[in-house]
Amino acid sequence: MSSGAERLAELIRGAGSVVALTGAGISVPSGIPDFRSPVTGIWADVDPMEVAHITAFRRNPVRFWQFYGERFSVLDGKQPNGAHRALAELEARGLLEAVITQNIDGLHRAAGTRDVIEVHGSVATASCSHCGAEVPLADVRRRAAEAQDGVPRCAADGTALKPDVVLFGELLDDRAMTRASTLATAADLLVCVGSSLEVFPVAGLPRLTLAAGGDVAIVTRSATHYDSRAAVRLDGDVEEELEAVLAAL
C-alpha cells in the first residue's frame, strides 16, 4: 500500500466533511474515453465547437445527433469500476458527504452513490425545448434508430430532442453549481479524482475549499494547477489508488 493512500485515509478519518469531485479520468477504467487524450480522447478527431455546441444543435440537429449517437453507443454496457464503487462505499460508511461530478455517464449512481451532483447534466434523459417533455435514454435511442434522419424527436410536436447535458455555449445549472460551491466551501477535505481541473467553473471548487481552510487531495495521473497546494497527491491508477485508500480505513 502506498504511503499516499495511507495519508489520504488519515485525512478522511480526521475530516468532519469529505466531498469528492470527479472528472472523466474516473470512468476511463470502465472503458469510457476521456476528452483530451491524443488519438483516444473524445475530441481527438473532431472540433467540439462544430458538433457539441448549443448553436450546432440548433442549426444542424442531424449532424449533432450523428456525433452524440456515437457517444451514446460508447456507453452501452459500461459498468462502474472500482473507483466508483470505492466512493459509494465511503458514502455508505458515512465518510463521504457527496460526489460532485463533471461526468454525464451516470456511473456514480449505478455504483450506489446516493448524493450525486451532476454539474454537466446526464445522458439519462433528453428533453423537448418546446413542450418540456423528458424522454428516458432507452426511448431516445429507439426514436433515433427509427428516424430516417437519425434525430430523435418529441412525440407531441416533432421538435428535435436535446440530451440533458450542458453543451458548449450553455451555462451550468444554477442549482447544481450552488450546491457544489456550498459543499466545497464547507468541506474539510475535497478529494479530486480523475479531473485535470481545467474546466471552469468546476475547476474553481478546490480554491473555495482551500480559501475556507480545508484540504485538497488529488488522485489523477495528469498534472493540475493545484498540485503544489494539495495535502496529498496520488498519480497511480484511480481504481488501485481508491481501493488502497478504502483498505487503509
Image (cartoon, rainbow, N blue to C red):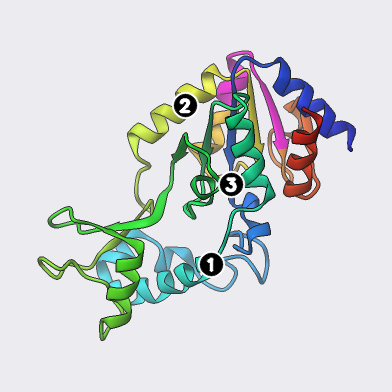
Quadrant assignment, res 207: top right
Q: Give the magenta-colored segment's residue range.
A: 207-218
At label 1, the amino acid type is Gly
26 shown above or below 16:
below
Indicate which label's residue lies in the foreground, 1 or 3.
1
Instruction: Report the residue at 53% width, 43% height from top.
Output: 112
Q: Residue 220, which numbered label?
A: none
For disc 2, the marked residue is: 181
Task: Say whether residue 209 is magenta.
Answer: yes
At label 3, the amino acid type is Gly
Indicate which label's residue lies in the foreground, 1 or 2.
1
Looking at the rendered image, the quarter that the C terminus falls into is top right
For disc 1, the marked residue is: 77
Question: Circle 3 — which element?
Answer: loop
Looking at the image, which residue sits at the far bottom? 148
Q: Are marks 1 and 3 in contact (CB under 8 Å)?
A: no
Q: Position of residue 39 (x, y in %)?
A: 66, 72
The answer, for residue 34, to whether it is visible in the render is yes
Quadrant assignment, res 62: bottom left
Instruction: Report the residue at 69% width, 49% height from top.
Output: 82
Q: CA distance from mark 1 to mark 3?
A: 20 Å
Question: Circle 1 — which element?
Answer: loop
Question: Circle 2 — which element?
Answer: helix
Q: CA distance from mark 2 to mark 3?
A: 16 Å
Q: CA distance from mark 1 to mark 2?
A: 32 Å
Q: Are marks 2 and 3 in contact (CB under 8 Å)?
A: no
Task: Say whether residue 185 is magenta.
Answer: no
49 shown above or below 201:
below
Q: Are marks 1 and 2 in contact (CB under 8 Å)?
A: no
For disc 3, the marked residue is: 23
